[in-house]
Image (cartoon, helix red, strand yellow):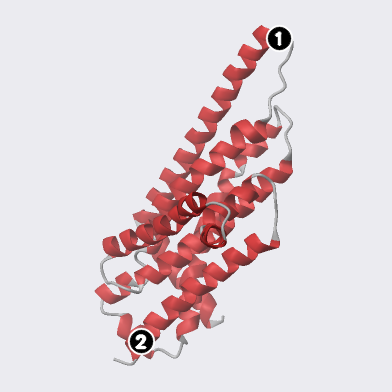
């Protein structure tokens, strides 16, 4: 077993003996289910109204009326939920005074950071996979374009990776888990709002740069079924940057 695999196994054991992952998972899946249900009910009501007006079966686009609003709402849910998953990763090590033991272990710092990140990312991917039951069930009753759904899920996976990497970084800054969660939420919200600032500046060089820095702009294209290499590069670079900053913070502690 490699050091990274050992860290992943250790963190997964810690997660699943704690009620946090079960509560967070249940809340996330419940909210996703409610959002999907409300979107489907709204589409059903619209279809009935159109059928009464037109006198024939209405053509409803599930991609625009169910999946797209659900994906947009899920982004907000992830912004609130994922910092709770990452808040304990390094903050708990500081609080329990095991942080120094971690630094003096034969495992390299980058392996510790990557292992902790991958452990929580695997949990997130598991929760995301469970939400896939919604489009699978809907496909039994109606037809829709799978491409925007798949790119939307890819967008959720990439955005979730960025959120979790930011949470790993903020967890290295403090021993208080609540503070770590709020720092992560504040950092992500600030980056999100860059999109609004870019829209205010309009089609100017500064506006384009600021809009590019906001993850929501890249996520929006994926939800609409557009897959561009620059969006993939953005999320990959964002994850690497957050993990690099986390590595630097942990490494700075070893010199004290």
Give whichever of 231, 254 is nearer the camera: 231
Give whichever of 209, 178 is nearer the camera: 209
Q: Is residue 20 left or right of residue 218?
A: left
* Residue that carries the numbered disc 2 in the rendered image: 252
Query: Residue 227 lies in what quarter of the image?
Result: bottom right
* Circle nearer the viewer, 2 or 1: 1
- In space, the residues marked 2 and 1 are separated at their CA atoms by 68 Å
Residue farthest toward the front in the current orientation of the protein = 204
Residue 133, placed above or below residue 4:
above
Residue 108 in percent (x, y) is at 47, 87
* Residue that carries the numbered disc 1 in the rendered image: 54
Say what secondary structure mark 2 lies in. Answer: helix
Say which residue appears at 69% left-offset and 62% top-offset. Answer: 229
Residue 13 in percent (x, y) is at 43, 66
Q: Quadrant of the N terminus?
A: bottom right
Say which residue appears at 44% left-offset and 77% top-offset. Answer: 245
Residue 29 in percent (x, y) is at 48, 43
**Disc 2 or 1, which lies upstream in sequence?**
1
Residue 213, placed above or below residue 143:
below
Mark 2 crowd level (few <14, some 14–19, many ≥20, 10 Å Cα): few
Say which residue appears at 28% left-offset and 72% top-offset. Answer: 174
Q: How many marks?
A: 2
User: Would residue 13 be seen by someone viewing this image from the given angle?
Assistant: no
Say what secondary structure mark 1 lies in. Answer: helix
Residue 58 in percent (x, y) is at 71, 17
Mark 1 crowd level (few <14, some 14–19, many ≥20, 10 Å Cα): few
Q: Is residue 247 left or right of residue 96?
A: right
């Amino acid at each position: 077993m490699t050091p990274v695999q050992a860290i992943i196994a250790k963190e997964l054991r810690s997660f699943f003996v704690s009620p946090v992952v079960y509560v967070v998972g249940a809340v996330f899946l419940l909210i996703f289910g409610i959002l999907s249900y409300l979107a489907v009910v709204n589409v059903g009501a619209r279809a009935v109204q159109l059928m009464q007006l037109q006198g024939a079966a209405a053509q409803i686009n599930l991609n625009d009326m169910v999946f797209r609003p659900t994906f947009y709402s899920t982004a907000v849910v992830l912004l609130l939920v994922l910092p709770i998953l990452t808040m304990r990763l390094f903050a708990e090590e500081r609080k329990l005074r095991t942080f120094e033991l971690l630094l003096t272990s034969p495992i390299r710092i980058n392996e510790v950071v990557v292992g902790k990140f991958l452990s929580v990312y695997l949990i997130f991917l598991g929760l995301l996979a469970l939400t896939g039951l919604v489009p699978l069930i809907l496909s039994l009753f109606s037809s829709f374009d799978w491409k925007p759904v798949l790119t939307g899920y890819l967008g959720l996976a990439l955005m979730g990776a960025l959120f979790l990497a930011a949470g790993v970084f903020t967890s290295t800054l403090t021993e208080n888990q609540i503070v770590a969660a709020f720092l992560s939420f504040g950092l992500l919200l600030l980056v999100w709002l860059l999109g609004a600032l870019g829209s205010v500046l309009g089609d100017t060089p500064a506006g384009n740069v600021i809009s590019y820095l906001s993850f929501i702009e890249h996520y929006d294209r994926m939800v609409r079924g557009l897959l561009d290499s620059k969006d993939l590069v953005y999320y990959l670079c964002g994850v690497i940057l957050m993990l690099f900053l986390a590595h630097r913070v942990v490494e700075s502690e070893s010199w004290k």
